[in-house]
Amino acid sequence: MKRSIWILALTTCVIVSCSKLLPQEPEANTVLAEPIADLTGSQMKKHILGDEDFAHIFSAADGLGPIFVQSSCENCHIADGKGNPMNNLTRFGKYNTDSTWNSLTEIGGPQLQHRSIQGYDPEKLPAGVQHSQFLAPNVTGLGYLAAVPDQTIMDLADPTDADGDGISGVYNEIEAPEWLTPDPRYHQALPNGKFIGRFGRKAAAIDLLMQTVGAYKQDMGVTSDFDTEDPINYATSQFGGDETVDPEVSATTVRNVVFYLQTLKQPDRRNLDNPNVVEGENIFKAIGCENCHRAELTTGPSEIISLNQVSFSAYTDMLLHDMGPELDDNYTEGIVKTSEWRTMPLWGLGLQEDSQGGAMFLLHDGRATSFESAIEFHGGEAAKSRENFRNLTATDKAKLIDFLSSL
């Protein structure tokens, strides 16, 4: 009898000990790298294929380089979340004498590739250029942003501040590369033949295909059926080829990655019933943050059920706003001012530390390490909201932070 009791106690101890040692399954609303709901069987298969391609680590043997920044998509977007400053991208260019922007493609712009495969020299930042650091954004919920019609973005724009609220909001005008056919359900050509940009810190990519093709080439030095030329370090050579046959990835691979990004779920809200979170959202609206970080947008038609004409809360207006000298890096892309930045979606904000190494890095380059410091950098069109934040009581500031943490 005593032996049976002893064995039972020992077994219980082992089970309890193992439960403490084994990792617990995370709550569903704290995970970013999940597909959206209601995918068909064939859509889920394509999502999984895209997931595998997104995580693929390239080597020189299968196309990395010859100059590059990272060896896989996931190295910057860990668990589909935001990156940290250690993996920042460096973009550069300068103004021409006629005040138009020059991306300096003839000397390796618009992005610095500071790593290289064996036998090649990495790039160094050219002298006399304007440059900026870009933090990798989270890639969840992008399918919703991709499916917002251009007309919505144009309706929200107020370039001359006609309503006198101090908030303008403009869109970038981007020329489509010859291999890109923008989807007429979402994109419409402007009178000058260009299209509205919606992805990237300066909204320089028209859609997810353009963004993905650019990332393959500029971030990993990987050519595709859409862009077959390796990046070149013009400081040392006029030749950018490597020993891998171009293109190094197929159009199918690129489109699988695009579909993966398109079908990642939107970050889930948490603590919705918490009174401080509810009051914090009201404070967020009252001090004017929602003028740019709009709570609701609606998608156009889509063959993907969860993206078909639905409202979602990303907390962005998808426009660019003048953020004043505090965030002016003297660098731009397209036609926007150097002080103008795309309103980044706030969803996933409370989860980003998980992918950033347990710390918080905010704004376009990660210079802010807390919600409060990020708000303090908001000048220009956001200066009034910043002043309103400064005038809040400590209790109300804490409630606002609780709301931001719930996103």
Image (tube, grey):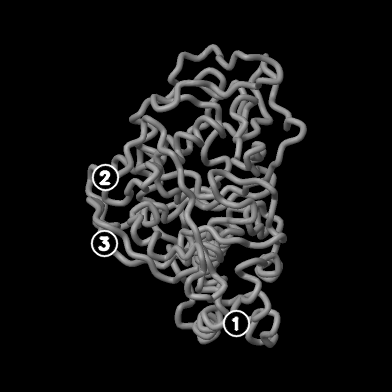
Please name the amino acid that badge 2 sits on.
Gln
The first of marks 3 and 1 along the sequence is 3
Using a 10 Å C-alpha cutoff, classify the residue at mark 1 as few (fewer than 14 neighbours), some (14 to 19) or many (20 or more). Answer: many
Label at residue 399: 1
Residues at marks 2 and 3, CA–CA distance in whole angstroms:
18 Å
Foreground residue, 81 or 325?
325
Residues at marks 1 and 2, CA–CA distance in whole angstroms:
40 Å
Query: Which element type, helix, strand or loop, lies under badge 3?
Result: loop
Please name the amino acid that badge 1 sits on.
Lys
- Rendered residue at 60%/21% (across/down): 232
Query: Is the residue 204 above or below the residue 359 in the image?
Result: above
Q: Position of residue 114 (x, y in %)?
A: 68, 31
**Residue named by callout 3:** 309
- Rendered residue at 69%/24% (across/down): 122
Query: Is the residue 286 above or below the residue 160 in the image?
Result: below
Query: Is the residue 288 above or below the residue 236 in the image?
Result: below
Are dots 2 and 3 in contact, CB under 8 Å?
Answer: no
Query: Is the residue 259 above or below the residue 11 in the image?
Result: above
**Residue named by callout 2:** 43
Marks 1 and 2: which is nearer the front? 1
**Which quarter of the figure has residue 181?**
top left
- Rendered residue at 66%/87% (across/down): 395
Foreground residue, 104 or 142?
104
Residue at the front extreme of this rendering = 98
Residues at marks 3 and 1, CA–CA distance in whole angstroms:
32 Å
